[in-house]
Image (cartoon, helix red, strand yellow):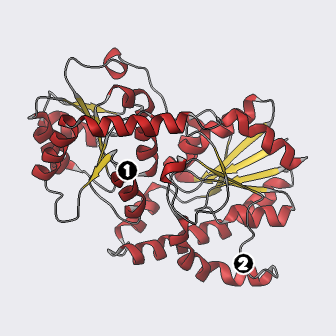
Amino acid sequence: MKALFIPGNSPATVYTHAALATAVRNAGHEVFMAGIQWVIPDIVSVGLPAVRTSPIDLDDVMAFMAGMPADPEGAARAAGRVYAEIGVESLDPLVKMAEHWRPDLVVGSPMYYGAALLAQRLSVPWVMLEWDRGDASIYHPGAMEVLRPVLDGLGLDRLPGPDLHIDVCPPSLRPEGAPESVTMRFVPANPQRHLEPWMYTRADRPRVAITGGSRVFQGDRLARTARAIGALGVEVVVAAPEPVAEQVRESDPQVRAGWVPLDVLAPTCDVIVHHGGGATDMTSMACGVPQLIVIQDVSAVEMRRIADAGAAIMLDPDRQEVEDIARACSTLLDSPSYRARARELAAENAAQPGPAAMVERLERLVG
């Protein structure tokens, strides 16, 4: 079997699809993973063959992010248009690739609209693999503005549905009316590095990790946040790329800052502070760590669900100053209920079938 994975247009989608792609490959099948130029190094970093679908790089992505509408609805519509444009523009390069390496199966995320179109062109099954707990339907209105002429040309009134839908959301967090699917355990995956003992060892005091996502903490704000949390008497780790981490270290040499694989670091943490990113949220949940969600945009509904479940605190838009963050961290550290609920969700995730169990389903789908 030849399986083509097209997870999406950000590194997070690559990491969350890596477990199933690796399981398929380990079962003796051929696997390619495709993506825009920005994510090609991430695909390679998780040990998978990478195929470029578009020259879009980090600079292009950052330019788009800078021009995003401020309101969540407008942001989702704009993102949907871009996701659809990338999917349509990538279709011809992928069809050309298929002339030499024809997949028997296409696996894509809800945000990669080209997966359904490619499977339709090649007359092969396609599988929708969720990459987080998000509701991709918020992107559909913007996407349909781009997809409508393409679908008309194919004689379709809507985007073809998947032949198999795999969900990684723990059942207790699934919203009412969620589409029918099979559930799979979420297994974290990250680019790795040479590990130092402190990265996988619990400290002699509580540890709080801050992920320096591109949409959140930058420069002085990140350093001030780390200092405020450190004043609680905890160890602070800032998991961020250079040169963001370098600025933090210069501001406070006591803070451990740099690229740390989150799947290694998370089990040693007592709280993880992040921006509402799906990969960070899912990794924290899989490791049973309470979360402090500081910035929310189009992911607000999903983030609110885990906060309502008692495993996280989600700060309101008017309570996101450094002092608010430190105060919420203190609450998470001092209240055992958050840790207990986070561990319950981790156990629920662990009880789901693993990626290896999904391989047989994919084999049957291909026949």
Q: Which residue is nearer to you in this view: 336 or 271? A: 336
Q: Residue at x 43, y 59 (%)?
A: 302
The quarter of the picture where residue 201 lies is top left
Above or below, 214 relative to 332: below
Q: Nearer the viewer, mark 2 or mark 1?
A: 1
Q: Amino acid at mark 2?
A: Arg
Whether residue 190 is visible, yes or no, is no
User: How far apart in space, not on screen, are marks 2 and 1 (Cα)?
Assistant: 35 Å
Q: Is residue 163 above or below residue 273?
A: below
Q: In the image, residue 234 lies at what x, y percent? A: 16, 29
Image coords of residue 111 (percent x, y): 58, 62
Q: Position of residue 70 (x, y in %)?
A: 32, 74
- The answer to which of marks 2 and 1 sits earlier in the sequence is 2
Write down the residue under mark 1.
309
Q: Position of residue 95 (x, y in %)?
A: 80, 60
> Is the residue marked by circle 1 packed among few (<14), some (14-19), or many (20+) residues within 10 Å?
some
Position of 332 compared to 299: left or right? left
Residue sitting farthest toward the top: 197
Rate crowding at label 2 as few (under 14), some (14 to 19) or many (20 or more) other CA atoms within 10 Å. few
